[in-house]
Image (spheres, rainbow, N blue to C red):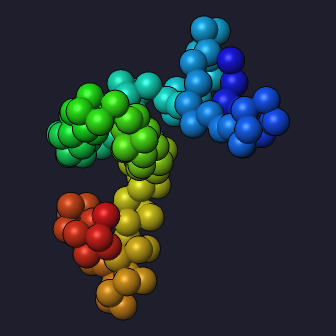
Amino acid sequence: MAAAAGGGSRYGEPVTALWSFDEQPRTGDPLRSGAAPAAIRDALLTEDRDVFDAAYQRALAAARDTLDLTELFRCLEHWRRVALLQRDPNRFASIARRAAESLTGEPVLDGEPLAQIRRRAGL
């Protein structure tokens, strides 16, 4: 079943699906939309995995308490996008470097640790 958007008089108002389940085997990019939490976590830099774990656990608890999956899906989509950037660590470091230089107006020194660059860039 695919996510569907649309409306119909049968329901009286527009109906949208924010999530769907597909029983077909998942092939292709493991980080495509709807990625599994494990695939997202695996693609993150090691130093972000604990942060992901904590955010995911909070979102799961909120979903359990509210019976609303919206925040869980927002959390997973946020981290999926981070994982897309981080799955190529060299590219991510380059992005962080450019962001830090752009935001601070100061060059990033050769050899500056990525963690420090990320702090400067707000990443």
Residue 26 seen in the figure = yes
Image coords of residue 57 (percent x, y):
21, 34
Please report the residue visible at 71 percent of the width from the left and 42 percent of the height from the top.
13
Work out whether residue 6 or residue 48 is closer to the camera in this orientation and state it.
6
Quadrant housing residue 74? top left
Q: Is residue 111 above or below residue 44?
A: below
Furthest residue to the bottom?
Answer: 105
Please report the residue visible at 66 percent of the width from the left and 38 percent of the height from the top.
16
Quadrant housing residue 111? bottom left
Quadrant housing residue 76? top left
Image coords of residue 88 (percent x, y):
45, 45
Residue 83 seen in the figure = no
Count the labels in the image.
0
Work out whether residue 46 or residue 81 is closer to the camera in this orientation and state it.
81
Image coords of residue 19 (percent x, y):
56, 31
Image coords of residue 106 (percent x, y):
32, 89
Please report the residue visible at 37 percent of the width from the left and 59 percent of the height from the top.
93
Q: Which image quadrant: the N terminus?
A: top right
Q: Is residue 34 above or below residue 122?
A: above
Work out whether residue 69 or residue 116 is closer to the camera in this orientation and state it.
69
Please report the residue visible at 79 percent of the width from the left and 29 percent of the height from the top.
10
Q: Which image quadrant: the C terminus?
A: bottom left
Furthest residue to the right?
Answer: 9
